[in-house]
Image: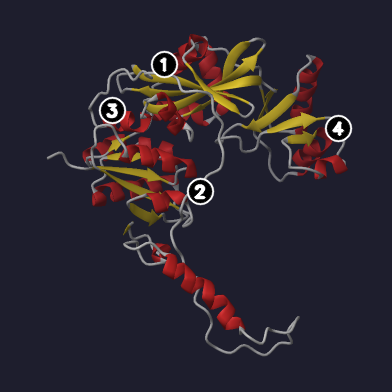
Amino acid sequence: MVSRVRVWLNRTYAENVFFMDQLRRNPDDRAVEIHATHGDPDSPVLATADVAELEPEGLSPAAYAEYALDRCRRYGIDVFVPRLHQAAIVAHRADFAAAGTALLAPTPQAVAVFEDKATAYAAVRSIGVPVPPWWRVRTAEELLAAVEELESAGHRACFKPASGAGGAGFRVITRAPFSLSHLTGFPSAHAPLDLVLRAVEEADEPVDWLVMPRLEQPEVSVDCLTGPDNRIRMAVGRTKNGRRRGFTLREQWLEPARRIAEGFGLHHLSNIQFRMYGGQPVLLDVNTRPAGGLHQLSLCGVNAPWAAVRLALGDDPGEVVPPFLGQDYTVVSGLRPVRPVTLPQQRTEQPEPLLPAVPAPASASASESVSQPASESAAAAPSGRAPAGALGSTEALPL
């Protein structure tokens, strides 16, 4: 009888509920026990996992790596997919291997290169992959000089943190003065240059930003699966142009992604993003982790999470090629459950009487009005689940 595989995802993105779903629906019909830890008790990954646990807060990266290693030993984790403190964890790959846990993560050298976007751009350019022009700025004077140089060449300037994930901190520079137009409609990624310069000048410490031209669509994210032998097993591009999404196997996107993944030891799952500049694809970003949209490859008949787990366990899936390319699609919000919780314990002592702002309804007291939702929540809790509020400790809870 084949034993079940225990897979742990730590403090991961909410979208990885789909990653977890795909592991359960693996084509080998292998039993999978999914562990998830997070700092947010309302993260849907906790409700989706078989074993959920709140993570300890305030740990240094080194202390977190010790916590992770201990947890892998205690629960017999077969495959660990680290996102939080990835660099500290992969530095102890041998210790995890001795505990029987395979890390679904790149080499320490690869994580170090791609933690910093400026270092990444320089490294990637050295192997012949095109990158956009960029300036690293830390002061208002450096920012203004970079913006003016870009604008003189006919480009729109934008900036983003030199380190960070996703689109956090990305802004497009505009010369339009701040006005009521900025306060109508939805918030925009455009930031007036004068306000940005003032904020940098008044900051308590220097910023660390990359300034570069606003790149053009399409944006193509290439999901890669690479073995410890530095040989790529899968490379599939996901295209984005406005709301429209699709897939591509065109070599203008896949070839530079393969070169990066194999050349820098981006073992297991990675995501390499490109956009257009001057009529050619250039590197936008490299993620040394599974992309939140990785599950979208299921529209092409590919279960990438399971192929990655097989590879981590030493069961090489071989070349993973989509049997077909799915039709174009878009992404909409959906519903996922969270763990049931109760209201905090109510005070039993009688407070000093206060004059009400409005008269209380004669048919219900204040205590009745707050207790009703708690009883409804308890009644709606799924059977077989852990008691409401039980995630208040770091003890693992089967779901």
Sort mark 2 into few (<14), some (14-19) or many (20+) by Cα contacts within 10 Å: few
Q: Is residue 394 above or below residue 262?
A: below
Give the residue pinned by disc 2: 335
x then y, percent, for residue 12: 45, 43
Looking at the picture, tell me which residue is in the foreground, 335 or 165.
Answer: 335
In percent of the image, x 31 and y 62: which residue is there? 384
Q: Nearer the viewer, mark 3 or mark 1?
A: 3
Give the residue pinned by disc 4: 176
* Marked residue nearer the N-terminal end (1 or 4): 4
* Marked residue nearer the N-terminal end (4 or 2): 4
Residue flagged by tag 1: what amino acid is it?
Gly
CB atoms at circles 3 and 4 under 8 Å apart? no
Give the residue pinned by disc 3: 311
* Marked residue nearer the N-terminal end (2 or 3): 3
Badge 4 marks a residue whose secondary structure is loop
Sort mark 1 into few (<14), some (14-19) or many (20+) by Cα contacts within 10 Å: some
Give the residue pinned by disc 1: 263
* Marked residue nearer the N-terminal end (1 or 2): 1
**Image-quadrant location for residue 135:** top right
Q: Nearer the viewer, mark 2 or mark 3?
A: 2
Quarter of the picture containing the C terminus is: bottom left
x then y, percent, for residue 374: 49, 72
Q: Is residue 368 left or right of residue 97?
A: right
x then y, percent, for residue 77: 26, 44
Q: Nearer the viewer, mark 4 or mark 2?
A: 2
Residue flagged by tag 4: what amino acid is it?
Ala
In percent of the image, x 65 and y 9: which residue is there? 279
In percent of the image, x 39 and y 30: which residue is there? 108
Disc sitting over residue 313 in the figure: none
Badge 2 marks a residue whose secondary structure is loop
Residue flagged by tag 3: what amino acid is it?
Leu
Q: Is residue 165 above or below residue 202?
A: above
